[in-house]
Image (cartoon, grey):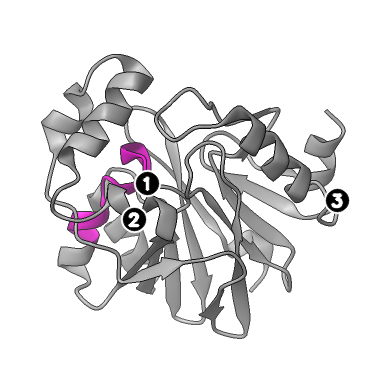
């Protein structure tokens, strides 16, 4: 898979990035935060069957389309780091509202579109591997934005999906429930030990590289 095959969809009112990561005729959908119909129609146009939903963390703007995707693709596997597992499952409404109120002062965005969240099918840990055709994604636990924030790194193609930990010219906020400023700086230091040419696909905003962000 070449880097150019990765598809960016900007979804929801907070303009989160949903990434479609194809391998063969299959794909991983990373952080489907909203606009399920757009995600599904894009997969159909590309003739891709999604086999994974990979969640960089559990905030609602990154998982809001999960119920609809599971309904459309019942065999799809939902994966999230174990320390963010409480953002999924039937009893997560209060957890999501707490985070959204801390972020924007209201839970209105959740209330307008809430559907019961399915539980994760796989709980991830640091160093886990996710098979993607001839490549694989390595899970990097990078807490700080949330306790279970994770990145998905394809060493073969030199790309990494960093969620809300590392952005172009920025990094994730730490003032939400589960956030920790010391942890996120440690996580950034870990990311900056990677090869500088690795292309970063963040949870919001434009793509960048490890080297560009390490210099800032």
Callout in the foreground (3, 1): 1
Please report whichever mark, 3 or 1, sits nearer to the chain's N-terminal start. 1
Disc 1 is placed on an element classified as loop
Quadrant showing the N terminus: bottom right
Rounded to the nearest angstrom, the CA distance separating label 3 from label 1 is: 28 Å
Give the spatial CA distance, label 3 vs label 2.
31 Å
Helix, strand or loop status at disc 2: helix
Residue farthest top in this picture = 105
Per the rendered image, the range of residues in magenta is 58-69
User: N-terminal of the two: label 1 or label 2?
Assistant: 1
Is residue 185 inside the magenta stretch? no
User: Which residue is nearer to you in this view: 137 or 180?
Assistant: 180
Residue at image position (43%, 37%) is 16
Q: Check disc 1 and report the residue beneath it.
A: 58
Numbered badge on residue 196: 3
Query: Is 146 placed above or below 111 here?
Result: below
Location of residue 13 with respect to 141 vertically, above or below: above
Viewer-nearest of discs 1 and 2 = 2
Mark 3 or mark 2: name the one nearer the start of the chain: 2
Q: As displayed, is residue 55 above or below residue 60?
A: below
Q: Which residue is mark 2?
A: 85
Residue 8 image position (x, y, % from top left): 50, 49
């Amino acid at each position: 898979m070449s880097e150019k095959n990765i598809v960016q969809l900007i979804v929801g009112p907070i303009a989160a990035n949903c990434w479609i990561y194809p391998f063969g005729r299959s794909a991983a959908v990373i952080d489907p935060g909203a606009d399920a119909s757009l995600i599904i129609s894009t997969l159909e146009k590309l003739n891709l069957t999604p086999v994974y939903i990979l969640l960089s963390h559990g905030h609602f703007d990154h998982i809001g389309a999960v119920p609809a995707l599971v309904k459309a693709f019942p065999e799809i596997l939902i994966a999230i780091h174990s320390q963010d597992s409480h953002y999924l499952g039937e009893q997560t409404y209060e957890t999501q509202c707490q985070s959204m109120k801390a972020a924007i002062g209201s839970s209105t965005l959740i209330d307008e579109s809430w559907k019961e969240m399915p539980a994760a099918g796989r709980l991830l840990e640091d160093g886990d591997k996710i098979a993607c055709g001839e490549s694989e994604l390595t899970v990097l636990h990078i807490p700080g934005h949330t306790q279970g924030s994770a990145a998905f790194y394809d060493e073969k193609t030199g790309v990494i999906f960093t969620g809300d930990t590392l952005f172009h010219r920025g990094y994730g906020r730490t003032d939400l429930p589960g956030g920790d400023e010391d942890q996120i700086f440690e996580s950034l230091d870990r990311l900056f030990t990677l090869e500088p040419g690795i292309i970063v696909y963040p949870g919001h905003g434009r793509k960048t590289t490890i080297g560009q962000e390490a210099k800032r």
